[in-house]
Amino acid sequence: MPLEQQQLQSLSHLELLAKQVVEGFITGLHRSPFHGFSVEFAEHRIYNTGEPTRHLDWKLYGKTDKLFVKRYEEETNLRCQIVIDTSSSMYFPFNPNSKEPGTNKIIFSAHCAAALIYLLKKQRDAVGLSLFSENVELNTQAKSNYAHQKMLFSELDKLINPISADVHKKSFTVDALHQIAESVHKRSLVIIFSDMLTSLRTDQGEDKDALFSALQHLRHNKHEVILFHVTDKSKELDFEFENRPYYFIDMETGEKIKAFPNEIKESYVKSMSEYKKDLMLHCAQYRIDFVEADIKEGFQKILMPFLIKRSRMK
C-alpha cells in the first residue's frame, strides 16, 4: 500500500476533514503562506549501530561511557493556544442526531479548531488546547510533535459527541480566562471560540466589567488574541422565529419561559446588540481581534483572520 494512502487511513474523520478544508483553502489563495523552519535540540536517545554519527553527543559519552544521539524537533515560529468554551449554550441549536459542521456552535468550533491545528502543523508551529465551562477542563501546553497533535484531535472528537439535554454546564468565563492567561507561554497567539454568554458570579461581585478585565488579562505577557464570537446569527442575534408559541430554554440552567417571539423580539435584539457592541468596543480597546463567526457560514472567515494575524507576528 502506498505510504500516502496508509497515512490517510490513519487519520481520524475530524483530522481528514481538517486536511481537506485547509488544503482547499490554501489552493484558493494561489500561493502558500508557509515558509521554512529551523530546529532545536529536544532530548537524547540510545545510539543504534549503523546510524549516522553526526548527532552523537560526545560530551555525554565522556560522562557516561555510552553513546547517545541528540534528538531534534522543529523550532516553532509561533506558540498558539486554542481556547474553546464547552458550556451547554455552545450546544445550541441542540440536535443530538447530527455531527455536521454547521449543526451547532460546539461542532462548528471543534471543526474550526481542527482546521487551525492542521494549518499550524503544516507551519511547524506549536499548538495547545484549553477547554472550559464551569472549570478549566483541559489545558495542554503548546507542542509541535505529532503525538501531541493526535491527542488534540482526539479531544476535539469528544466535543462533537452530543451531550444529554439534561446536562447543564454553566460558563464561568472570567475564572477560566484568568487561569489560561497565566498558564500560556509568553508571546503566544491565543484563539478563543465562545458565544461569550457567560455566567457571572454576582455573589462575588462579578459583572460585565469583570469579563472585560479577564479579556484584558489575555494581553498579559504580550499575547496576541483573536476572539471568534460563535453564534447562530439568525436565531441568537436576529431572533428569527415563526410567530407561534415556543418554550425558550436556558441551556446552562434549564430555566424556561413560554412566549410568542414577536412579543419579546424587539427587547431581545436590542439587548443582544448592545452587549455585542460593548464586547466589540472593549476588544478594540485591548487590541483583541474580534471576529464574528456565524455557524451557518464557512471556514473562510476563520482561517483568513488567523493567517493575517499570523503574518503580523513573524
Image (cartoon, rainbow, N blue to C red):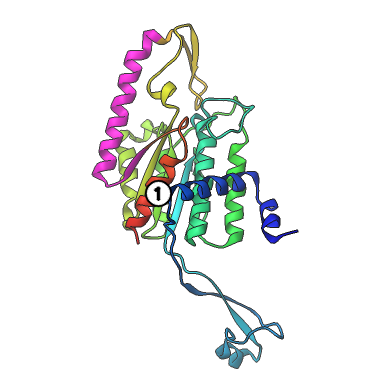
Residue nearest the observer in this picture, 288 or 179 = 288
Residue nearest the observer in this picture, 199 or 38 = 38
The residue sitting at 51% across, 46% down in the picture is: 24
Which type of secondary structure does the marked residue at label 1 adopt? helix
- Residue kind at label 1, given as amino acid type: Phe
Q: What x and y, as percent, mark residue 1?
A: 75, 58
Q: What x and y, as percent, mark residue 131?
A: 51, 44
Evaluate whether residue 141 shows in this view.
no
Q: Is residue 267 magenta?
A: yes
In this picture, residue 112 sits left or right of residue 200: right
Residue nearest the observer in this picture, 216 or 28 = 28
- Check the image and name the residue furthest to the right: 1
Evaluate whether residue 36 shows in this view.
yes
Residue identifier under label 1: 306
How many badges with numbers are in the image?
1
Eyeballing the image, is 93 above or below 145? above
The residue sitting at 58% across, 88% down in the picture is: 60
Magenta extent: 262-291
Q: What x and y, as percent, mark residue 192?
A: 42, 44
